Structures are given as C-alpha cells and as structure tokens.
Image (spheres, rainbow, N blue to C red):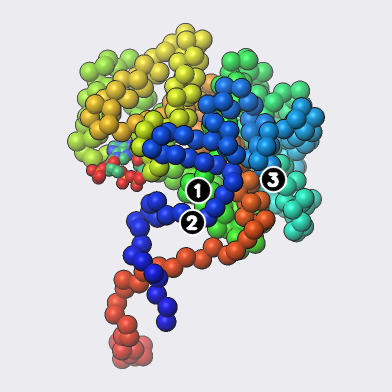
Amino acid sequence: MTSPDAAPKAGLEGVVATSSAICHIDGGQGVLAYAGYDIHDLARDASFEEVCHLLWHRRLPSRAELGDLQSDLAAARRLPEAVSRLMRSLPPGNAMDALRTLVSSLAHSDPDVGDRSPAAAYRTAVRLTAQVGSVVAAWGRLNAGGGVIEPDPALGHAANFLLLLTGRRPSELEARALDVALILHADHELNASTFAARVTAATLSDLHSAAVAGIGALKGPLHGGANAEVMRMLLEIGADADDARVERTIRDMLARKTKVPGFGHRVYRTEDPRATHLRRMSQEIGERSGSTRWYEMSRRIEAVMKAETKIDANVDFYSASTYYMLGIPIELFTPVFAVSRIAGWTAHVLEQYANNRLIRPRAEYVGPEYPQPFAPLDRR
Ligand SMILES: CC(C)(COP(=O)(O)OP(=O)(O)OC[C@H]1O[C@@H](n2cnc3c(N)ncnc32)[C@H](O)[C@@H]1OP(=O)(O)O)[C@@H](O)C(=O)NCCC(=O)NCCS
C-alpha cells in the first residue's frame, strides 16, 4: 500500500499543481499578466475579444484575426431554440443554477460535440464564450419580464451583453466599463473554478462538462459569489447611511469574525491589481450617473478594513458597485463573472488537452484504524 509523500496543505495553499503558459500572478508584487502581457496594459487598451485570443493562442491578434474572431462570436451569439425553450420552462430561481443547467444543455446543440480534434475543441471554446454571455443576458431579461432581443453583430461582446439584458444600446462608457470588467475577470491562473475545469478535462471529458464544473465551483461565496454578497452588504448598510454607520457595520462584522465580502485573497499580499481598475470604473460610472454614493461607501469600507486588518480589496469589491450602476441585477453578478471566466476555463481546458495526464492526487488517511474487525449485519 502506498501513502502520500507529505502532509497535506490545507486548501492546497502554495501547492504548484501544474505548469501553464496562460496566466502569471506574483501575489507579493501584485502582478497579474495574461501570456506575459500586464493586466494594466490590457485593461487600458485591449478589448475582451483581444484578450480571448490572447488566452487561447498566447499572442494578441492581428486586425484580421480579431475580425475573424468577432465574426465567429457573432455567429454563435444567438442561442439554439432548444436552449431558449428549456430556459423558458425553468422555474424562476438562482441564476447560477440556471446557468449550470443551460450550459450543460448547450452540448446537445453543439455541432462539434464528440469530435476530439483540437480544431473542434477550439470552435467549441469560441462558441461557448459567445453563448454564456447570451444565456446570462437572456435569463436576466426573461426574469425581468422582457422580450427576446436580437444580438447586434456590429457591437462587441460587452455591449451585446448589455443590449440583450436591458434591451437598450449601452453608452460608450457603459460598454467600456463592462468590457474592462470582462478583461479583468477572464483568467486567474489555477483559481478554484479553473482547477475544477482542468480536473474534469484531464479525464478527457468534454468542454461543456468542464465549463459546468467551473460554474459549480464559481457559485460559492468564497469564489465568484462574493460580488453579489458585497452589493447586498452595501444595500443593507443603506444608500443614505453616514460614515459612522458604515464604520460601525464593518467593525461589528470583524468583531463577530464575519468575513467582509470583497476583501482578502489566497494569492495577493498586496492590492489585487484588478481592484485598481474596478475602483476607477465604479467612480467614473457613479460620476456619470450623478451619484457616487456607492463608490464613496466602498472607499470608506476599504479604509476601515485597511486600518483594522490591513486586508486589501479584491476583484469582487468594486465590481459590485460597478455592475449595480450598470443596471445589472444583483443575482446576475456571479453569472457575469462566468461570462468572462469562460474564456479562461476554455483556454485552460485546451492547454490541458494539448499535454494531458489524469489529475489524481492522494489524500492523507485520518479515519478509523486499519484493519477494523468486520462483523456481518446480523451481529452488529
Ligand atoms: C478569499 C478568501 C477565501 C481567501 O481565503 P484563505 O486564503 O483561506 O484565507 P483565510 O480565510 O484563512 O484568511 C486568513 C486570515 O485573514 C482573515 N480574513 C481573510 N479574508 C477576510 C475578510 N474578507 N474579512 C475579514 N477577515 C478576513 C481571516 O479571518 C483569517 O484571519 P485569522 O488568521 O485571524 O483567522 C478569504 O479572504 C475570504 O473569504 N474573503 C471573502 C470572500 C471573497 O471576497 N472572496 C472572493 C475572492 S476573489
């Protein structure tokens, strides 16, 4: 009988489980880079579609390549009728549950399902990235009682998402705010949902199954669920709360040892570089909409957290107020994370397929002593 070599690290903290050419994080320095490109450059000057190409191919697209990708995404944006029908038949409920079900159902209409070639897997990755956006937007619209909206091939992925969700063409600032949020959430090395997706892919299961595994992991409040928790906390504190009330609420949470959503990170020991851009977006959208109340409350909370715990804001903290001011309903905040992270999940799955070995770690056994004397049922 073999046994694991070393005692386990709780939560696999610091364990290097694979090599990957997709995403580099230096948690001490606050560096995040996709295929070598600094996240600050990408957030300033790239589009989500360029970032998708970068994650999938490890290089930025030429203008012609970007045009081809935009056409492929546009062609896949309209949902298969069977999926739209299934969506209408689901009872109203948790949007992540609906997303998990509907992404699973997309496999039934995928023309490349069952084709194991890298070219087919890539086509499915592009298709899934287009479709996850359409599923989340259509689910939000359906639950708000709105009718189906046709995607506009002339608009980018972020603008199309807002159009399909709200029925209104977004302003340039709104579309760019979501585009930046999608860029910032697109990949993050071996985070819990990406690891779940890679483990699934490493059994040589298909991309839809890997995406469903990723969605399941993302749903939890310690991962993607945190952005919705942040907004619920801000609303509970109340738009008209004064600074004293904001500070009291946070100090009470800390005294009760309740985690403040949107703070802390397993890897970063300094500011999450994604928070820097979302903070700016939250402020800009607030200024444009005539009220920076949510932004200011968030700043106050950040200051209290810094003073009391030295723990920094993570990606979820300012994405909450940004999404809220974009008119995205709170129950869609975590699904919107998936609208972006599907690019990273699929990139990691393609990378896993290209050099696969089954991922199968060991557990340190700590159960009842072996061997236990076995008594048949009628003598127990
Ligand atoms: C992200 C997170 C899960 C990382 O977890 P982790 O690496 O396992 O770190 P731990 O939960 O062990 O936290 C380490 C210490 O910091 C404290 N801490 C971490 N995040 C905190 C938060 N958001 N609020 C208050 N205290 C926090 C913990 O209480 C713990 O303190 P202790 O050592 O005195 O017990 C954790 O910071 C968290 O739950 N944050 C809130 C949820 C969130 O925003 N998730 C999105 C992440 S992008």
- Asked if the residue at tag 1 contacts the one at tag 2, i.e. Cβ–Cβ closer than 8 Å, the answer is yes
96 and 25: which is toward the camera: 25
- Pointer 3 or 2: first along the chain: 2
Q: Which residue is mark 2?
A: 17
Say which quadrant the C terminus sits in: bottom left
Q: Amino acid at mark 3?
A: Ala
**How far from the left and from the top, in percent, is residue 151?**
73, 28
- Asked if the residue at tag 3 contacts the one at tag 1, i.e. Cβ–Cβ closer than 8 Å, the answer is no
Residue at point 44%, 22% (across, down): 279
- Pointer 1 or 3: first along the chain: 3
Q: For residue 28, what is the image quadrant?
A: top left
Q: Give the quadrant of ligand 1.
A: top left
Residue at point 72%, 23% (across, down): 155
**As drawn, which residue projects farthest toward the top?**
290
Judge depth for marks 3 and 2 and give the one in front.
2
Q: Which residue is mark 3?
A: 125
Q: Which residue is mark 1?
A: 190
Query: Can I make out residue 320 in this image?
Result: no
- What is the C-alpha distance between the residues marked 2 and 1? 8 Å
Q: Secondary structure at mark 2?
A: loop
Q: Amino acid at mark 1?
A: Leu
**As drawn, which residue projects farthest toward the left?**
255
**How far from the left and from the top, in percent, is residue 62?**
75, 30
Query: Can I make out residue 183 in this image?
Result: yes
On the rendered structure, is 237 left or right of 349? left
Say which quadrant the N terminus sits in: bottom left
Q: Secondary structure at mark 1?
A: loop
Q: Label 1: how many residues lie within 10 Å, few (<14), some (14-19) or many (20+)?
A: many
Q: For residue 271, what is the image quadrant?
A: top left
